[in-house]
Image (cartoon, coloured by chain):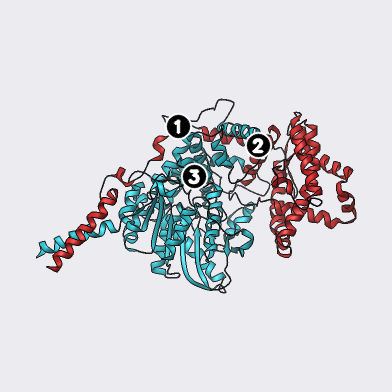
Chain colours: A red, B cyan
Amino acid sequence: MTKTSLLLAMLLASGATYAAEPVSAPGVAAEADGFTEPLKALKFNAGLDQREFERSTLDALNVYDPLESVNRRIYHFNYRFDEWVFLPVVDGYRYVTPQFVRSGVSNFFSNLGDIPNLLNSLLQFKGQRSMATTGRLLLNTTIGIAGLWDPATMMGLPKQSEDFGQTLGFYGVPAGPYIMLPILGPSNLRDTGGLVADFAAEQQINFLNVAEVSQDHPELFLLRSIDRRYVTTFRYGQTNSPFEYEKVRYVYTEARKLQIAE
Amino acid sequence: MPRLLRFAALMAGLCLSPLLSAADIDEASYGFPLTNPFEATIATTPPELRAAVPDDRDIDQADYTLNLHPERELEVPDNFWPVKTLRYRMAKQKGPAPLIFIIAGTGAHYSSTLAENLKKVFYGAGYHVVQLSSPTSYDFMTAASRHATPGVSTEDADDLYRVMQAVRAQHPEVDVTDFYLTGYSLGALNAAFVSKLDETRRSFNFKKVLMLNPPVNLYTSITNLDRLVQTEVKGISNSSTFYDTVLRKLTRYFQQKGYIDINDAMLYDLQQSKQHLSDEQLAMLIGTSFRFSSADIAFTSDLINRRGLITPPETPISEGTSLTPYFRKALQCDFDCYIREQLIPMWRARTDGGSLLQLIDQVSLYALEDYLKTSKKIVVMHNKDDVILGPGDLGFLRRTMGDRLTVYPHGGHCGNLNYRVNTAAMLELLHD
């Protein structure tokens, strides 16, 4: 008797749960398992013989790179330098300095960088951007205490990078051959020229006296290099592909095109 | 009497089956905003809905190296020096704590975004965390895999197991209370096979194994992924490729925005803008990323085993040698091509051979059906709109896992793994 009532109770209980969830009964048809078949909504090429991935990727491999052999060796040199010197130094820097010091350092050098950003915005007649960068420089250099703090970004004036390579590109100078620069990484002939021009301009302007002081205090230059690596998130090997060189080359080339067009 | 017994068994079955049914999270209470599976897969959760996780600088972590195959030093050309030893990442808690291994998905590195996010979630909850690259990744294949031909799940699990044992041996000072195991995508399938292996080798006695978005039938999954690059994408012509189309949209998006700002929210924001990508284009992008994985796998496996399909054996390769010609060849090889040209021949030669169907049965979750049914420590989280699943796959999981399966209505493939509802559920599932 007790057995029967127990069974009955269990049966009732199971009925109740069944009602709450009708789809999960065992052995039902495939569609009832809840799968929504996301691929069904897509339009596929009828013959499934489209070669667009292959075509696009083969096309993307056509970057003018006459110095490839040398570039690849420099890429490997940079990779090793990064692993054995640069990143350990950055780790040490991270270990010995508190966070607020590191962001102060990053903001300070970033504020210096707004000078070439402004110059190059002006050279490209980008009025709005020049105004915004001028605003950033004024705010960050004064309220931000010589750039140690970045109140401008918080007030809605984000940093907008413009370098001389972009300016050259804006005036139609072609990229030229792809160049892997020692330590600095991917570039091309135009952007390498731009880099030199921006550096020369910085020496001339001597904003906040940094360029002049750096000549007597190479440690300032060192700190700047460490900060540069500290804020750059790229890690060699992060694409985890035997074809990282090709991928970096394509991404660099396209990213520069995008920066110039924008 | 037998009839009575049979009746009792039937009743017991009826009573138990609903109790053991999967937890289906209903759409209204779930609140995940991306109902489009392709957007979810690419953009993942909008930043404001992500789980709060510790910052990188608050995590005591470092990368370590294992030298598992010293002979590869000589076998593999010099310009693969970075992957001749296997790297992994470990985050340590101060005192005794449980340790969780994270296995990355197809082709993925231990430091891929998904693995990093999972690390932060588990580290924040007090676990020591070890991140491992997928057995299908370039570094793992070169440095840790015995055959460097991934895809036979039992062999991959064996390779992973050796790595995990070596990791444990390298850190005797780490005080571990219990071992846990998780993986996403293909890494989830790997986790199940590793757990099975652990039942006999007993090095870890995993307390819980969490599978996130696993493939059920491996062949269905790779067929789906291979097909994604066959969608009809608009805007391509003789002079303009698919990448050009996407980059054009991106350029216009930034021009309209007024400045370039690449961050976590960008993809989400792009999809809300006029320049948003169509479902076909998103699918093509997902397919493209997997085709790069299959190209890497095909190239690396061929090179290490000297099969001569892509790289002629004995080709002198130095640091200055261009690999572009091999890339051109490898990128034409999708997963199906890799399986037919490299995996099946090797598997046939090593075992007594068999058909593709037999291979599929051996390497998919079907091979573990009985184990998954009885092993209560294994839990699965999946999505109803995951692109790697085929019809019937969720049904298999429902039958096999019962109440140890949680099914979410949205999220695409792993797009909701950083959604705070999901991360809370993960920790909950590991906890009890």
Dot 1 falls on a residue whose secondary structure is loop
Q: Are the residues flagged by discs 3 and 2 in contact, CB closer than 8 Å?
A: no
Q: Which residue is mark 3?
A: B41
Callout 1 crowding tier (Cα within 10 Å): few <14, some 14–19, many ≥20: few
Q: Quadrant of residue B129?
A: bottom right
Out of A215 and A25, give the one closest to the viewer.
A25
Q: Is A198 above or below relative to A26?
A: above
Out of B83 and B312, give the one closest to the viewer.
B83
| Chain on which label 2 sits | A
Alpha-carbon distance for marks 3 and 2?
24 Å
Q: Are the residues flagged by discs 1 and 2 in contact, CB closer than 8 Å?
A: no
Q: Amino acid at mark 1?
A: Asp
Q: Amino acid at mark 2?
A: Glu
Residue B125: where, in percent of width, then height?
52, 64
Q: Amino acid at mark 3?
A: Thr
Out of B23 and B49, give the one closest to the viewer.
B49
Q: Is B258 above or below relative to B159?
A: above
| Chain on which label 1 sits | A
Q: Which residue is mark 2?
A: A254
Q: Nearer the viewer, mark 1 or mark 3?
A: 3
* In-image side of A156 versus A113 (left or right): left
Residue A111: where, in percent of width, then height?
78, 47
Residue located at (41% from left, 35% from top): A41
Alpha-carbon distance for marks 1 and 2?
28 Å
Q: Which residue is mark 1?
A: A49
Q: Are marks 1 and 3 on the same chain?
A: no
